[in-house]
Each structure stands twice: as C-alpha cells, then as structure tokens.
Image: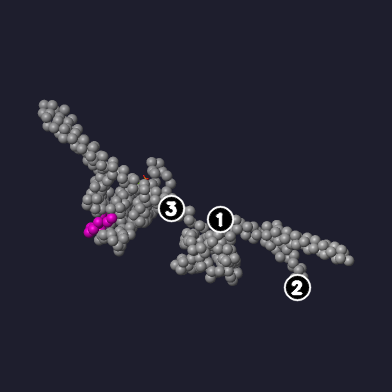
C-alpha cells in the first residue's frame, strides 16, 4: 500500500517537475523574443496575446544601449528606465521606475528641464545638465527629449536618451589646458625671438647703417657712381632696419606693456592703413586704466589676426574698431565692410590657407575666460566681437 502511494506521489512529482520545466522554458522563450503570441484562457474563453516581435527587439536594443533610456509621463514620473540609466544614477532599477525624474536633478536644472519639456511636445530638444546619483556623485549628461505621442492618443509619453558627457568634458578640459600651454609657450618663444632680433640683428644693422653713411660721406663727388651706390646701400639698410623693427614689434609689442592696448591699436592701425590703404576708424579706446596683461595681449593678438584676414580675404575699404567696457565686461569689436563669408559653414581647407586664424582667435579669447562671436554674411562684411568678463578687482576702462 505504502509502496503504491509512494509510486503515485513520485509520478505526480515528476509530472509537476515537467510542467515547471515547460513553464520556465516558455518564460525564457517569451523573454528572448522567440514567441510571437500566447494563448490564454480567461473568463471569456481562449484569448490570444500577441507579443509584438518588433517591440521586443526594440526593448532588447534599448537594454543593450550604452546610454540611459527612459519613458516618462509629462509630469516627469518615470514609467520605464533601462539598466544603463540605473547604473548612471547608481540605483537599483526597481528604485527608479515609478519615481520622479526630478530627484536626479538640482532645483535649477529641474526648472530648465520643465521649460525644455514644453518644447519637446512639439519637437525634439536637447539639454545638458548634471545628473545627481543616489550615492551623491554628479555626472554631466546630455538629455535628448522627444514626445512619443501616438496620433489621436490622449496621453503623451516622453522619451529620453541620457548620454554621459564625463569623457567629453575631460577631453575638453585637457584640450583647454593644452591650448593654454601652447599659447604660453608661443608667447615666450615670440618674446625670445623678438629680444634676439632687437639685441643682435637691429644693433648690427644700426652699426652697418652708420658705417655705410661714413662711407658715403668719405666718397667725394669725383667717385660719382660709387657714392650713389653707397647712398642707395644706406637707404636700403635703413629700410631693412625698419622692417626688422616692425617684425620685432609684432612679435612682442613693447608698447603694449609700456603704453597699453589703445596705444598699440593706434600704431598697428596706422601701419596697416599705410601698407594696405584700408582706413581704420577707432572708437571708444580712451582707457583710463589698464586691463590685466593677459587680457591686453589676447585682445591684441585677436586684433592682429582679424586684420590679417581683412587684408587676405575681405576686400574691404573700411574697418571700424571699438574698444569699450560694458558693466564688468571688456568688449572689442572689429567690423569690416568687405565681401563677408558664410560663418555658419564649417570652413574647408583652401590652397595656401590653414584655416586656423578664426580658431586661434577663439582659443585666445577662451584663454582669458572670454568669448568670441563672428557675424558674417556674403557681401555684408564681417564683425568679430570679443567679450571678456573682468573680475571686480580688475581695473576698469571707459
Ligand atoms: N574678414 C573676413 N572677410 C571675408 N572672409 C573672411 C574674413 N575672415 C575670415 N574669412 C573667411 O574665413 C575663412 C577662415 O579664416 P581663418 O582665418 O580661420 O583661415 P585663413 O585666413 O584662411 O588661414 P590662416 O588664418 O590659418 O592662415 C577664410 O579662408 C575666409 O574664407
Ligand atoms: Mg586667417
């Protein structure tokens, strides 16, 4: 009797085990997308539940992404988040879904997101902010927001893709540090070359100039052609000395250190007009106090580069330069009436052109914590504006 019961129980157990295995296998197949539909029996009898193969594939794709992906209600309640987002905010997935997205943002960023969400219902938007993780750490991210509203559906669902910008920020910082270093080294080398030119070449040229003058004086009118040659030689040497002096000044404008930015803008403008015939009008340059040395040098280098471009590309007749202070900001504006160019387009490399001038100007501005804006349109001239924020301790200009 006992043996018979044991046999029945063993057989039942085996049957249950078999069904359990089958159920587990079915669940695995549903999870892995091998099943398109499931037949269920409910109160209304047999019913087919389709498992939308494409949806499953999308879900798999989203889980495999290296970016956070979420769906949210319009009042920012998280409906779904992928594993990657849970890792980003260092929370368990169960702690994320059902909660508000705002818990991962500062109050200011939450406000900014709210504004962007309003636009996102019309078109996709992107916003960069700091994600506050559950362990208190912060991560710079870009959030792409898009409304996932179906046509005719009352409820709007918001889709978000969250991209970690940590690496990008690190690379940007390294690039900025490198640019700072390059600018420093470049200025130091320019200074060294200028010093050597001044101390050696200019001195030598002056000595030869004096000797050639003595030679011209010693030759009498009887020596006719020889005296003429000596005089020409002296004039040529004088011209060479002036050229070397000009190069030295451009390499390291001594006047900048001595007399300040407005004086250098004036002398450089006068030289430019004399050489090219392009008239430069200077306004608002009456500085009552000096700007920090780094800022003066950056603004001067930007000015030099802008004039190079005017000479090379603009075919301008007039350039206006405006140096002023607006509140706590120093502003330099260089505007030409030349042919202009499409400043929105990425410049392509042309023959004999490195296309580094504008980039260098931006870097110079960034070096002193400033910004550079270029406004240019074909046939409407070019305007370059540099703005540098002065710390309250800095001297002011009028
Ligand atoms: N003032 C300007 N007027 C008209 N076009 C300009 C002006 N400034 C710049 N450009 C246009 O923008 C392009 C990029 O200028 P950028 O100074 O970066 O490079 P570049 O002058 O061509 O070469 P590089 O300065 O490296 O020797 C120029 O090739 C030119 O087409
Ligand atoms: Mg250039």
Residue 75, given in percent of the width and then of the height, sits at: 53, 70
Q: Bin the neighbour count of mark 1 within 10 Å (Cα to Cα): few under 14, some 14-19, many 20 and up.
A: some
**Label 3 sits on residue:** 172
Residue plotted at (72% across, 60% down): 24
Q: Quadrant of the N terminus?
A: bottom right
**How many numbered discs, if any?**
3
Query: Which image quarter holds the C terminus?
Result: bottom left
Pick the residue in front: 45 or 383.
45
Residue situated in front as seen by the camera: 288 or 171: 171
Span colored in magenta:
281-292
Identify the residue position indicated by label 1 in the image: 66
Q: Position of residue 216 (x, y in %)?
A: 14, 31
The secondary structure type at the circle numbered 2 is loop
Image mark for residue 326: none
Q: Magenta span has 94?
A: no
Q: Earlier in the sequence, mark 1 or mark 2?
A: 2
Chain-order first, disc 2 or disc 3: 2
Mark 3 surroundings within 10 Å by alpha-carbon count, few (fewer than 14), some (14 through 19), many (20 or more): few
- Alpha carbon separation for disc pair 1 and 2: 43 Å
Q: Quadrant of residue 16?
A: bottom right
- Identify the secondary structure beneath mark 1: loop
- Label 2, label 3: how many angstroms apart (C-alpha)? 62 Å
């Amino acid at each position: 009797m006992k043996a018979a019961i044991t046999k029945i129980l063993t057989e039942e157990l085996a049957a249950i085990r078999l069904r359990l295995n089958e159920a587990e296998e079915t669940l695995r197949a549903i999870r892995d997308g091998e099943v398109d539909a499931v037949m269920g029996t409910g109160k209304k009898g047999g019913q087919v539940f389709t498992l939308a193969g494409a949806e499953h594939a999308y879900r798999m794709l989203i889980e495999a992404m290296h970016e956070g992906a979420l769906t949210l209600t319009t009042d920012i309640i998280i409906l779904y988040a992928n594993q990657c987002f849970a890792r980003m905010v260092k929370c368990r997935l169960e702690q994320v879904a059902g909660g508000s997205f705002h818990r991962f943002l500062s109050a200011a960023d939450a406000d900014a997101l709210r504004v962007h969400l309003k636009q996102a219902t019309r078109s996709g938007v992107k916003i960069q902010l700091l994600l506050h993780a559950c362990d208190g750490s912060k991560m710079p991210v870009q959030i792409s927001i898009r409304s996932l509203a179906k046509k005719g559906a009352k409820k709007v669902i918001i889709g978000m893709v969250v991209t970690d910008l940590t690496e990008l920020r690190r690379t940007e910082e390294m690039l900025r540090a490198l640019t700072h270093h390059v600018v420093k080294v470049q200025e130091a080398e320019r200074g060294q070359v200028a010093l050597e030119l001044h101390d050696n070449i200019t001195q030598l040229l002056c000595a030869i100039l004096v000797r050639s003058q003595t030679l011209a004086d010693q030759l009498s009118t009887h020596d006719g052609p020889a005296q003429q040659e000596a005089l020409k030689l002296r004039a040529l040497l004088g011209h060479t000395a002036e050229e070397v002096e000009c190069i030295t000044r451009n390499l390291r404008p001594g006047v900048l250190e001595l007399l300040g930015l407005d004086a250098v803008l004036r002398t450089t403008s006068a030289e430019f007009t004399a050489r090219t015939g392009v008239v430069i009008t200077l306004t608002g340059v009456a500085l009552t106090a000096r700007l920090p040395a780094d800022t003066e040098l950056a603004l001067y280098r930007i000015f030099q580069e802008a004039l190079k471009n005017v000479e090379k590309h603009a075919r301008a007749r007039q350039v206006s330069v405006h140096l002023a202070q607006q509140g706590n900001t120093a502003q330099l504006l260089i505007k030409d009436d030349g042919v202009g160019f499409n400043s929105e387009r990425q410049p392509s490399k042309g023959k004999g052109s490195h296309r580094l001038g504008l980039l260098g100007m931006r870097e110079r501005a960034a070096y002193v914590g400033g910004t550079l804006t270029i406004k240019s349109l074909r046939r409407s001239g070019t305007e370059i504006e540099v703005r540098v924020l002065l710390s309250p301790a800095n001297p002011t200009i009028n």
